[in-house]
């Protein structure tokens, strides 16, 4: 079975600073990887996904993530954050060729301060 | 409809009562997921339906929880003999054939008193 670990439950940063939200997964087979975002009082929406090909994927709102197979990681990054990026971010994994169960991590709450 | 619809949006129930939560997925989406979101616990997988295949029930926390999906569309999550620890936001999501994006509803906030 697959699992996802988001090491940081809360990440406070100042506006215009860079940020990295960490995600590690555990799986015995190849996976698809996703980042979802939940803005305050809103539903979850997809930020970006890695299916195959280039290990660097770009998503909405200037976010990007890099798939590292050897380190089983899929960290999310943004070079300069805005106040509006304050939200909770969830990493998720789905097994290739198996059950299409989408398993999420516990989330990282990003707070951007002025 | 345009998105995943869940009802009710809020539900307060007494301990020991049964509750039913409803999810209307996006038309044409074959996959449907139920998750439970509790503070500090992230999204806990409950159950997954895909077309006519047997559902993946591996996340249901106890036999008080059950779900069905009628006609490959609407789904109902039933919690019997509710307990205070069942209080959470229950989220439903749907997607077309994987591995495409899962679209989430706004959730049902369940409070057991």
Image (cartoon, coloured by chain):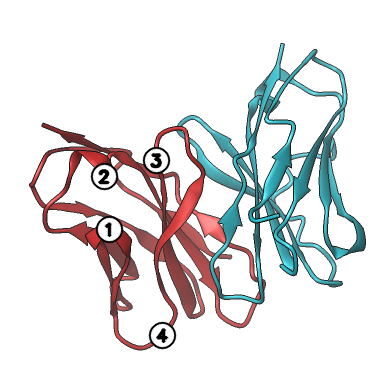
B101 left or right, relative to B68: left
Disc 4 and disc 1 on one polypeptide chain: yes
What chain does mark 3 sit on? Answer: A
A85 left or right, relative to B64: left
Q: Reading the chain from its start, which is encountered first: label 4 or label 1?
A: 4
Could you tell me if the residues under marks 1 and 2 are in contact, i.e. CB atoms within 8 Å? yes
Mark 4 crowd level (few <14, some 14–19, many ≥20, 10 Å Cα): few
Badge 3 marks a residue whose secondary structure is loop
Give the percent coordinates (x, y) of residue B35: 64, 46
Residue under label 4, please give it: A52
Residue under label 2, please give it: A85
Give the percent coordinates (x, y) of residue B14: 80, 13
Nearer the camera: disc 4 or disc 2: 2
Q: Reading the chain from its start, which is encountered first: label 1 or label 2?
A: 1
A90 left or right, relative to A99: left
Whole-number angstrom distance, CA of label 3 to CA of label 4: 28 Å
Q: Quadrant of residue B26?
A: bottom right
Give the percent coordinates (x, y) of residue A43: 51, 43
Q: Reading the chain from its start, which is encountered first: label 4 or label 2?
A: 4
What chain does mark 4 sit on? Answer: A
Residue under label 1, please give it: A61
Disc 4 and disc 2 on one polypeptide chain: yes
Specify the quadrant that holds the C terminus of chain A: top left
Could you tell me if the residues under marks 1 and 3 are in contact, i.e. CB atoms within 8 Å? no
Q: Quadrant of residue B13?
A: top right
Badge 4 marks a residue whose secondary structure is loop
Q: Colour of chain A?
A: red
Q: Reading the chain from its start, which is encountered first: label 3 or label 4?
A: 3
Check residue A39 in the rendering and tell me which mark sits there, or answer none.
3
Specify the chain shown as cyan.
B
């Amino acid at each position: 079975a697959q699992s996802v670990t988001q090491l940081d439950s809360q990440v406070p940063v100042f506006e215009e600073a860079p940020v990295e939200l960490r995600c590690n997964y555990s799986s015995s087979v190849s996976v698809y990887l996703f980042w979802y975002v939940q803005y305050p009082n809103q539903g979850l929406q997809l930020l970006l996904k890695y299916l195959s090909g280039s290990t660097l994927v770009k998503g909405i709102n200037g976010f990007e993530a890099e798939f590292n197979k050897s380190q089983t990681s899929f960290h999310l990054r943004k070079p300069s954050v805005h106040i509006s990026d304050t939200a909770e971010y969830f990493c998720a994994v789905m097994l290739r060729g198996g059950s299409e169960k989408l398993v999420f991590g516990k989330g990282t709450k990003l707070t951007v301060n002025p | 409809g345009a998105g995943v619809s869940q009802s009710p949006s809020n539900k307060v129930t007494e301990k020991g009562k049964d509750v039913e939560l409803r999810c209307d997925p996006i038309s044409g989406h074959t996959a449907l997921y139920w998750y439970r979101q509790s503070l500090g616990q992230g999204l806990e997988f409950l159950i997954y339906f895909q077309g006519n295949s047997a559902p993946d029930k591996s996340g249901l926390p106890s036999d008080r929880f059950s779900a069905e999906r009628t006609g490959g569309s609407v789904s109902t999550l039933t919690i019997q003999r509710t307990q205070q620890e069942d209080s959470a936001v229950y989220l439903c999501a749907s997607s077309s054939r994987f591995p495409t994006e899962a679209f989430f509803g706004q959730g049902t906030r369940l409070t057991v008193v």
